Amino acid sequence: MMTYWIDITGTFMFAISGALAAWDKKMYHDLFGVFFTGFITAIGGGTLRDVTLGVHPIAWVKDAYYIIAITSGVLLTIIFRNRILKFRRSLFLFDTIGIGFYTILGVEKSLKYGVNPLAAIILGMMSAIFGGVIRDMMVNEIPLIFSRQIYATACLAGGVLFILLRHLGVAEDVNEIVSIIAVISIRLASLKNGWSLPYLDKRGN
Amino acid sequence: MMTYWIDITGTFMFAISGALAAWDKKMYHDLFGVFFTGFITAIGGGTLRDVTLGVHPIAWVKDAYYIIAITSGVLLTIIFRNRILKFRRSLFLFDTIGIGFYTILGVEKSLKYGVNPLAAIILGMMSAIFGGVIRDMMVNEIPLIFSRQIYATACLAGGVLFILLRHLGVAEDVNEIVSIIAVISIRLASLKNGWSLPYLDKRGN
Amino acid sequence: MMTYWIDITGTFMFAISGALAAWDKKMYHDLFGVFFTGFITAIGGGTLRDVTLGVHPIAWVKDAYYIIAITSGVLLTIIFRNRILKFRRSLFLFDTIGIGFYTILGVEKSLKYGVNPLAAIILGMMSAIFGGVIRDMMVNEIPLIFSRQIYATACLAGGVLFILLRHLGVAEDVNEIVSIIAVISIRLASLKNGWSLPYLDKRGN
């Protein structure tokens, strides 16, 4: 039940982030473009995860509350599109919370379907970032995952931590909370301190 | 049986539209590029729909007539590529008929697989437009769905109408015909009258 | 068992080709970008094939050795990134061997899942080339399949040959070897002799 509402809330936040991105670009300024970008951003990661795992039916196809959450998120963005810009920083925070939750939910769902731990970590990371990758490609920006920021890497680290604590016998719900906080903390700390991934130059250094 | 031939005919028309688009662009002028673009355009929407629904095997993978229809469409385009340009307006009409049929077939198939009505409308629309979206991306054009024309919106309106009439108890076959005609009429009327979707400007008007 | 090691080796080679391509482009120079491109290149074709066929679980999700092979390929590329450039020509050869094996494995797997022979040829070709198509798109190059070289066409020809020999009753293992060699030979001969596909000009010649 808890995970259900985490999922719905995450979907809602991703829809807002997609609609905002579309509205920032002139080419997607019409109503359909804003809805479509919000929708694809919101369902992208979960659909990729469920199709890869062979889970059917996919959540948003079975349960209408996902589409209601997406529609609400897009409509609120359109109605409050001027005021919402002032909340951008908090929206960014919700996005960060979103990738935290989605990573760990993705790892858990993958393990439940018999996936090996390494693939579960990768699927958890992918389900967290894929919606945003499509969103950035649709509005012609270089996806955030390629910007040398600690973004996908924070998801991977949280996934590794979850698997490790699980093997050490830590209780599932404690593990969930600790791992989600790890993803969020790494992402926030890296932004604050300007951390980035090692750069590989052409001369081999 | 009727729906089977509608499906094959739609696949054939989408293959022609893909091959024509590829041939218009210099970079896809070789035989393989024309075939590949025609093929992807023709199978894109149905494959997306069936993978999302978890339907296996996908139609074109099971039944060779789909590939024969695609190959015929591409070959005819290559052989008659000069004469076919004169028929462009009628091809456009067939494309419009195609999205009409595919929308309603997609909605019906989704409902048959237990999908909620809201998701069925969205999947119907997506199965109608997805092949064309990939086609436009392959030939480096902004997908038609983002051009402020009434395109995907006509599919959504037809899907909503189909669901409404179904809830009112209208007979399935009457409903199919009425809803298909609705998609086609909205698309044609909007083009003739220059209708477009509301534009959201940055100042919030 | 033989096909398993062919699959693992192919995955390893594709990971190297993806990591090399990413490393050649400045925007993917960080560690994550190189890993991600190697990973997507390595799993792209097999995932597309298995999702289309409805095979679950997908190989790399079930068996951790795929991810270990990919990680090893990417790490070796990063460590030996200067020396590896000298082996580019042999890497190109391995890529060619890779598409040979993947084409025929893809055709066989498709037939095993009840796919019609025409679709099996197309799926075999797609599973061989799809990882490379995504790789080229990620590093902003025109995919190799659109370069008028005999590339995907070599896969198609090998797939047709395999189906023909199968219908003529040729033993499976002999057929595999002959068809794989056909793909590789056509690709190598076309490069050496500058063969390309017929070009369709706008005046209809």
Image (tube, coloured by chain):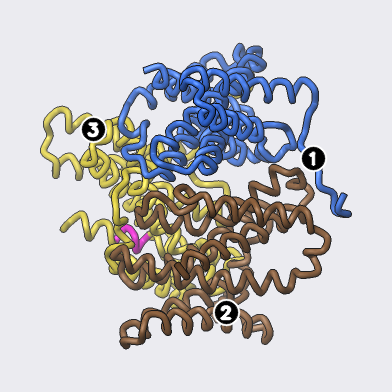
Chain colours: A yellow, B brown, C blue
Label 1: which secondary element: loop
Q: Mark 2 or 3, which is nearer the eye? A: 2
Give the number of the disc on residue A163. Answer: 3
Residue A37 numbered tag: none
Front residue of B52/A102: it is: B52
Q: At 33% across and 34% down in the image, what residue appears? A: C61
Q: CA distance from mark 1 to mark 2?
A: 38 Å
Instruction: Please tell me whether mark 3 sits on a helix, a strand or a loop.
Output: helix
Which amino acid type is shown beneath numbered disc 1? Pro
Amino acid type shown at disc 2: Ile
Pinpoint residue C7: horizontal percent, then vertical percent: 44, 23
Chain letter for mark 1, please. Answer: C
Q: Position of residue C183 (x, y in %)?
A: 62, 25
Residue C117 covered by magenta stretch = no
Give the residue at mark 1.
Answer: C198
Say whether marks 2 and 3 touch (CB < 8 Å). Answer: no
The residues colored magenta run: A9-13
- C118 left or right of B31? left
Task: Name the dominant secondary structure of the magenta segment.
Answer: helix
- Vertical arrangement, residue C127 with respect to residue A63, above or below: above
For residue B124, say whether it is visible: no
Number of residues whose C-alpha sits closer than 10 Å to that of mark 1, classed few (under 14), some (14–19) or many (20 or more): few
- Give the residue pinned by disc 2: B184
Residue C145 lies, in percent from the top left, at 66, 37
